[in-house]
Amino acid sequence: MTLKLRSAGASDRGLIRSGNQDALHSGTWLVAVADGMGGMAAGDLASAIAVGAITPLDVETPEDVLVAALQNGIKLATERIRQAVAEDPQRQGMGTTLTALLFARTGSCLALAHVGDSRAYLFRDGVLKQITRDDTFVQMLVDQGLITPDQAGSHPRRAVVTQALQGDEVSPTYATMVPRAGDRWLLCSDGLSNVVRADTLAEVLAGQREREACARGLIDLALQAGGPDNITVVIADVVDEP
């Protein structure tokens, strides 16, 4: 038996925004969420560029090159965003978050890449854990002990990211982990995590085993909470298959 990744994703523009600047990839080996910023067309473009740059990684990859593959994908995304800004100066300032998970062909390892404030959560043995750390101004305040995590959720500057893919040098976070059968990963834009509590996320992840329905159920909760932003969700399950 070999561990495999099975995923499903969904996205919604929410109830306030006129368009959707998020992008996602939900594949066999790779899952990713990107949240664009910097004006309507430019935000759309930045997130699409980022996801487009790493989508070719959705292939069987040896575990010893997982991180290098993600690094190369992010480097390509950065170059393409830089080129897009050079082609049209009105795109100056556009950028995107990116959170991506790449599963090894052997099923023995996975790698995670993260920049910005889209999140990756791991639901394992009934416990939900946020794996990524937000690259945001309020997270810096939390780290410095100036505000509590609860205060961060309602802080007026909670949407201010401290780094994103914008065509210049960036320092993404990379990590590797050993997957287990039964693990459930949630990747999401802040349109979900800003308005739905972690304990509620855990309840849905535990209660709805069907991936597509789980993704839609989480989006529905964000909409019920006002849907102030675009909402993107990817559910990825680690399964034991022959």
Image: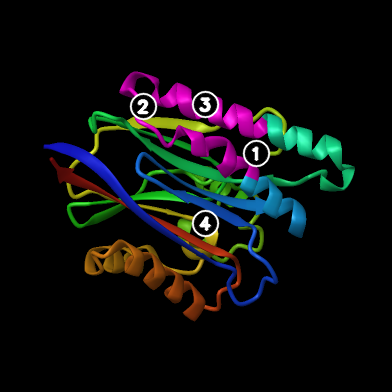
Residue at mark 2 to residue at mark 1: CA–CA distance: 24 Å
Of 228 and 63, which appears nearest the observer?
63
The earlier-in-sequence mark between 3 and 2 is 2
Q: What is the distance, in whole Å, between disc 3 and disc 4 at their CAs?
A: 21 Å
Q: Position of residue 215 (x, y in %)?
A: 38, 65
Q: Tell me if label 1 and label 3 are in contact, CB under 8 Å.
A: no
Above or below residue 15? Residue 2 is above
Query: Which SS class for mark 2?
Result: loop
**Relative vertical location of residue 225 with respect to residue 67 in this rendering, above or below:** below
Q: Position of residue 110 (x, y in %)?
A: 32, 33
- The residue where tag 1 is placed is 165
Q: Which residue is mark 2?
A: 61
Instruction: Report the residue that reaches farthest toward the right.
Output: 89
Q: Residue 75: image x %, image y %?
A: 61, 27
What residue appears at the point 51 percent right and 52 percent down from the top-left corner?
A: 24
Kindly identify the residue that appears in the image at 54 percent across and 32 percent down: 172
Instruction: Report the amino acid beneath label 2.
Output: Thr
- The residue under label 1 is which amino acid type? Leu
- Residue in front for this viewpoint, 187 or 155: 187
Magenta-colored span: 49-78
Looking at the rendered image, the disc whose residue lies closer to the viewer, 4 or 2, is 2
Badge 2 crowding class, 10 Å Cα cut-off, few under 14, some 14 to 19, many 20 or more, is some
The residue at 70%/53% (across/down) is 43
- Report which residue position mark 4 lands on: 189
Q: Toward the viewer: 120 or 107? A: 107
Amino acid marked by disc 3: Gln
**Which badge, 1 or 3, is on the more N-terminal residue?**
3
Q: Secondary structure at mark 4?
A: loop
Residue topped by disc 3: 71
Horizontally, residue 207 falls left or right of residue 41, namely left
Tell me how far mark 3 sits from mark 2, CA to CA.
14 Å
